């Protein structure tokens, strides 16, 4: 059965699952907390196989292996980069993707309402496992940028430039968490300048000097900003924001308006929806998908409607979906 024909359903008690964890994800010892989370799943009758990554690309390879073994679910214990790798392996398959968040920002987990790591929150992974076991499987859209799928967003310009300078971060840097990332990102951003871009969204062409183009599949950006409040995960569209300008001062103004959710009142922000985009720049600009470097302009981006099955908690915000009805099995 194709993804767009599926109605929301819960994972069964006989679910076959592969848990893939990144030992160097985030600021916590994932390996130490994972056994309790796995025990929660096994108590629900799940058959669970646990795999650890050892080097770059392992997570996507292990997720593809689970797909080929006809597992029902792949649960990723990691951050948004790990989610991206798994999504690229599981796209267009019937295997559902779940998350046991253990990364730095954990934007996907925050977006759907899965418990995220906090100081002294020792049961976090176990609580996340419960939210997955009790959750609902839903098909969502993916974006695709130059052949690479993304779950949350893609970006061209400022945020991609920052990502290219910071990633990949060594494990000792990750120990400083979001504070260390934010400080480095701010310092790099102060030196960035916008450039002339030509952005084609479906049949509309926009030419301007831009600091950044953000292409959103989800609503939340960076863990704190509601950059695309009208986006839906399953509507077959991408929400596009073009931030005009050239200086860091203008970037700060844009950032403040995003946080205040007042970009609609800013003449220097163009907000549109589209299914296919093409971006060219006078000066080659970095691109990213889900905060992972993804080459430079020119770049082609398109939506892949309902290309991925995901597990979301029952309390996930209904405004994330076109059809907010959560049917029971």
Image: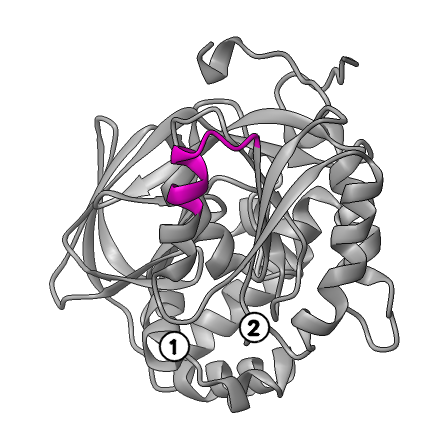
Left or right, residue 220 beside residue 90: right
**Is residue 173 shown to the viewer in this render?**
yes
Left or right, residue 169 beside residue 177: left
Judging depth in this view, the residue of 78 and 18 nearest the camera is 18
Judging depth in this view, the residue of 47 and 312 nearest the camera is 47
Question: Around disc 2, counting alpha carbons within 10 Å, would you say few (fewer than 14), some (14 to 19), or many (20 or more)?
Answer: some
**Is residue 268 shown to the viewer in this render?**
no
Marks counted in the figure total 2
Q: Residue at x 46, y 78 (%)?
A: 249
Q: Position of residue 297 (x, y in %)?
A: 17, 57
Label of residue 168 in the image: 1
Looking at marks 1 and 2 on the same chain, the residue that comes earlier in the sequence is marked by 2
Indicate the quadrant where residue 144 lies.
Answer: top left
Residue that numbered label 2 is attached to: 23
Tell me the mark number nearer the camera, choosing from 1 and 2. Answer: 2
- Magenta span covers which residues? 63-72
Query: Where's the C terminus, which quadrant?
Result: top right
Residue 29 lies, with reference to residue 84, above or below; the image says below
Question: Around disc 1, counting alpha carbons within 10 Å, would you say few (fewer than 14), some (14 to 19), or many (20 or more)?
Answer: few
Judging depth in this view, the residue of 132 and 141 nearest the camera is 132
């Amino acid at each position: 059965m194709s993804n767009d024909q599926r109605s929301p359903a819960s994972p069964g008690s006989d679910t076959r699952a592969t848990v893939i964890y990144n030992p160097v994800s985030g600021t916590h010892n994932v390996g130490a907390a994972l056994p309790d989370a796995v025990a929660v799943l096994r108590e629900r009758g799940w058959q669970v196989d646990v795999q650890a990554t050892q080097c770059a690309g392992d997570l996507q390879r292990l997720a593809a292996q689970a797909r080929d073994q006809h597992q029902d679910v792949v649960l990723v214990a990691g951050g948004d980069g790990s989610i991206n790798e798994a999504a690229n392996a599981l796209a267009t398959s019937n295997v559902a993707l779940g998350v046991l968040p253990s990364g730095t920002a954990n934007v996907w987990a925050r977006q759907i309402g899965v418990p995220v790591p906090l100081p002294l929150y020792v049961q976090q992974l176990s609580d996340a496992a419960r939210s997955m076991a009790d959750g609902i499987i839903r098909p969502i859209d993916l974006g695709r940028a130059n052949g690479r799928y993304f779950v949350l967003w893609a970006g061209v310009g400022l945020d991609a430039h920052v990502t290219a300078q910071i990633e990949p971060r060594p494990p000792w840097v990750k120990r400083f968490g979001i504070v260390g990332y934010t400080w480095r990102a701010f310092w790099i951003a102060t030196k960035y300048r916008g450039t002339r871009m030509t952005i084609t969204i479906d049949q509309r062409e926009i030419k301007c000097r831009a600091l950044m183009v953000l292409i959103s599949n989800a609503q939340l950006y960076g863990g704190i900003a509601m950059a695309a409040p009208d986006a839906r995960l399953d509507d077959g569209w991408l929400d596009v924001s073009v931030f005009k300008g050239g200086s860091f001062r203008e970037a700060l103004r844009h950032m403040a308006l995003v946080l205040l959710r007042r970009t609609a009142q800013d003449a220097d922000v163009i907000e549109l929806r589209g299914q296919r985009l093409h971006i060219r720049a006078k000066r080659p600009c970095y691109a990213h998908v889900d905060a992972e470097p993804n080459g430079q302009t020119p770049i082609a981006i398109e939506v892949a409607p309902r290309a991925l099955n995901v597990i979301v908690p029952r309390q996930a915000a209904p405004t994330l979906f076109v059809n907010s009805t959560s049917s029971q099995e």
